[in-house]
Amino acid sequence: MSENVRTLSHREPDLKGSYCHQLNMAARVFRFQQTIKVLAARNFPVQSCRFFSHGDRNGEHLSSRVYWKQKYKGSQEDAFDWFLSHSVLSGLVDHALSNVSHTPSAGSHSLSTPEVTETKPVNVLDLGCGKSLMPKCLYEWKHFPLTVYCLDYIQDAVEFQLGTLQTASPGHTDSNVYGVCASVCQLPFHSRSFKLVTDKGTMDALLKNSTTGVTQAREMLCEVHRVLQDGGVFMQITDEDPDSRLYVLETNSPSSPSGQWTFSVLPEDEDRKQECFVYMFHK
């Protein structure tokens, strides 16, 4: 495995102690596999949450861990991406990262070494990475080094990302990637760890559960707010319009004197047969 692409150990990065054992177990599974299938990042079709809801009017199965575990386990299909093509997603990543500084915020928690230098990588977190292009777009960022954390509660999805990125070249020589198997509702990181957190379709899946969806969305937003550094950015991509999604985001996010939500619309195009929306929160 490329030295830039790795799973978590108890020494790097510095995790919240209560989750270390669980993640170390996952890391050992990854590390001692005889081989990890390397799936080339090619021919990524664009799909949406509505595509997976076919046959289920409410799409409630999308909130089921069992469904995703079965979907990803041993899957030989090419990677897919919800909502956006690679070029559009790269543009959004560029926009989001241009809004954060590559100098760590005062009082932020280091995930690796305590020394702070001008070349220290910026920590970014992708929630519910699945088989998305988001980690690749982040890894290709050239302007300053990033440490990208691909997080999913399905181990096979994390393995897929590590295998895919093993064949990719980082945009910056000091950038690197970690795989994390954990829940978005219980993030195994210290507070104020990340300059950028991204979500593309993960909250959509949580909200498909008519019983626990809103509660889990609130837990996820609280965790995102906790791990974001002051001045950090949370970017969410979805096909849900502002009339519905802004209410969920604003009523379930922790109060923040300086925080505010903004959104933009991505119109239909030849790759995307429906509008998509990008919501951003600046802490």
Image (cartoon, rainbow, N blue to C red):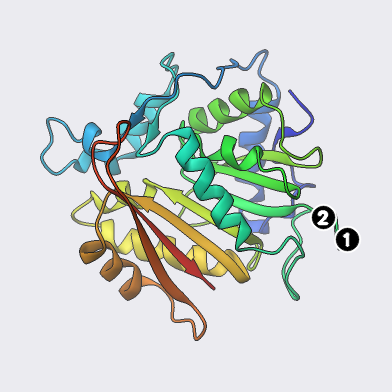
Q: Mark 2: which secondary structure?
A: loop
The residue identified by callout 2 is 120
Q: Which mark is residue 126?
A: none
Query: 271 or 184: nearer the eye?
Result: 271
Q: From the viewer's perspective, is residue 240 above or below residue 23?
A: below
Residues packed near mark 1 inside 10 Å, few (<14), some (14 to 19) or many (20 plus): few
Q: In the orientation shown, which residue stands out farthest toward the bottom?
A: 257
In whole angstroms, how far apart are the C-alphas of marks 2 and 1?
5 Å
Q: Tell me: residue 59, above or below residue 186.
A: above
Residue drawn 66% across and 49% down? 20
Question: Which residue type carries mark 2?
Answer: Lys
Q: Residue at x 40, y 27 (%)?
A: 80
Report the quarter where the N terminus lies: top right
- Seen in the picture, residue 257 relative to 190 is either above or below; the reply is below
Residue 153 visible? The answer is no
Residue beneath label 1, please?
117
* Residue at screen point 73% across, 48% down: 143
Discs 2, 1 touching: Cβ within 8 Å: yes
Give percent across and percent down for residue 164.
59, 24
Task: Give amino acid for label 1.
Answer: Thr
